[in-house]
Image (cartoon, rainbow, N blue to C red):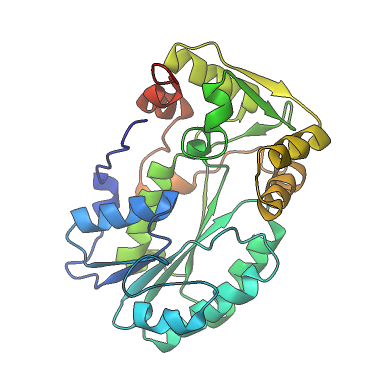
């Protein structure tokens, strides 16, 4: 797989203060967190990467670990794991926002999802205790195709999913990271909700076709029932909680409610969102199985 070398976009620099202060990145090993941390560090911004393996350690299930991470920081990037949709997540991120406020944190950026009822309840609860928070309300990540649960079946040539015909404006995480950096370093984004999508709608079949064209491989999307989908996940050892999250995603969120494009990236950064075709071309080698694999 490619190493996904990150080059901070000049768009993320626009309006950046001379001294934005130290930024805590929660979930710094995740898909968005590592991009945000690397961009900030490339800009010379002091970064406190926070996860269960860092010092100081951060653990969502252990509030005693929160204060050492937040102490002395000017901003915090909040990517809740495993997902804002799980029961109790809104209450947990709200307690984190209260802790950040009480620690004197000036900016809080919350990663959220479009069309997710619990996620949007979390957004509102966080706003109640930290009115200046910035929300990044994201479409389905393009990088789920090469950095997450969709990669392995694509390497096998067939992506079987319980969705057919629903179009989604897949968002490139490079755009999400650029907007996050802008919001973490510039007060102009305080209190805003940035709804982030790609520039066009694609069905999963169309997205897989783009991947096939970019990688030079014969890959295809196959619609299946939810029962077959969840049974297949369980058969390969996917934990029940994760199976439940994916079932929620494909039944509640990917039902057409998000089948429209927004100008969130344009408004936040002053430039268009990256297209899925450009993403696929950039990461094409990820979908080519290694020799002998």
How many numbered discs, if any? 0
Position of residue 163 measured from the top left corner of the image (x, y, whole percent): 73, 31
Instruction: Give the position of the C terminus as an image quadrant.
Output: top left
**In front of the other: 92 or 153:** 153
Position of residue 7 measured from the top left corner of the image (x, y, whole percent): 24, 42
Answer whether residue 14 is visible to the viewer in this image.
no
Position of residue 274 measured from the top left corner of the image (x, y, whole percent): 41, 34
Q: In this view, does 51 lie above or below 142?
A: below
Q: Which residue is drawn at 37% across and 62% down?
A: 183
Answer whether residue 72 is visible to the viewer in this image.
yes
The answer to which image quadrant residue 101 occupies is bottom left
Q: Which residue is drawn at 63% across and 38% down?
A: 260
Instruction: Give the position of the N terminus as an image quadrant.
Output: top left
Position of residue 4 measured from the top left corner of the image (x, y, whole percent): 32, 37
Q: Which residue is drawn at 47% across and 33% down?
A: 146
Q: Farthest residue toward the front?
A: 292
Q: Which residue is drawn at 58% across and 27% down?
A: 153
Q: In this view, does 189 lie above or below 259?
A: below
Q: In this view, does 237 lie above or below 280?
A: below
**In front of the other: 130 or 146:** 146
The answer to which image quadrant residue 175 occupies is top left
The answer to which image quadrant residue 158 occupies is top right
Q: In this view, does 236 lie above or below 127?
A: above
Q: Farthest residue toward the bottom?
A: 102
Residue 225 falls left or right of residue 28: right
């Amino acid at each position: 797989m490619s190493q996904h070398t990150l080059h901070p976009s000049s768009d993320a620099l626009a309006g950046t203060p001379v001294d934005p202060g130290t930024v805590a990145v929660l979930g710094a090993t995740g898909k968005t967190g590592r991009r945000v941390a690397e961009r900030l560090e490339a800009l010379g911004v002091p970064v406190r990467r926070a996860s269960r393996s860092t010092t100081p350690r951060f653990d969502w299930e252990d509030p005693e670990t929160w204060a050492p991470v937040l102490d002395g920081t000017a901003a915090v990037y909040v990517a809740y794991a495993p997902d804002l949709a799980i029961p109790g997540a809104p209450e947990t991120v709200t307690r984190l926002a209260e802790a950040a406020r009480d620690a004197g944190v000036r900016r809080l950026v919350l990663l959220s999802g479009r069309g997710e009822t619990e996620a949007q309840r979390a957004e509102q609860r966080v706003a109640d205790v930290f009115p200046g928070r910035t929300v990044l309300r994201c479409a389905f990540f393009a990088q789920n195709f090469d950095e997450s649960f969709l990669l392995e079946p694509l390497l096998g040539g067939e992506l079987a999913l319980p969705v057919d015909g629903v179009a989604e404006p897949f968002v490139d995480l490079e755009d999400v990271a650029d907007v996050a950096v802008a919001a973490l370093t510039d007060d102009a984004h305080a209190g805003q909700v940035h709804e982030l999508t790609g520039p066009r709608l694609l069905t999963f079949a169309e997205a897989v076709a783009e991947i096939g064209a970019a990688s030079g491989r014969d890959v295809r999307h196959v619609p299946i029932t939810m029962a077959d989908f969840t049974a297949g996940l369980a058969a390969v050892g996917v934990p029940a909680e994760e199976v439940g999250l994916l079932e929620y995603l494909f039944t509640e969120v990917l039902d057409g409610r998000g089948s429209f494009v927004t100008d969130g990236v344009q408004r936040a950064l002053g430039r268009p969102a990256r297209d899925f075709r450009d993403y696929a071309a950039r990461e094409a080698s990820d979908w080519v199985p290694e020799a002998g694999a």
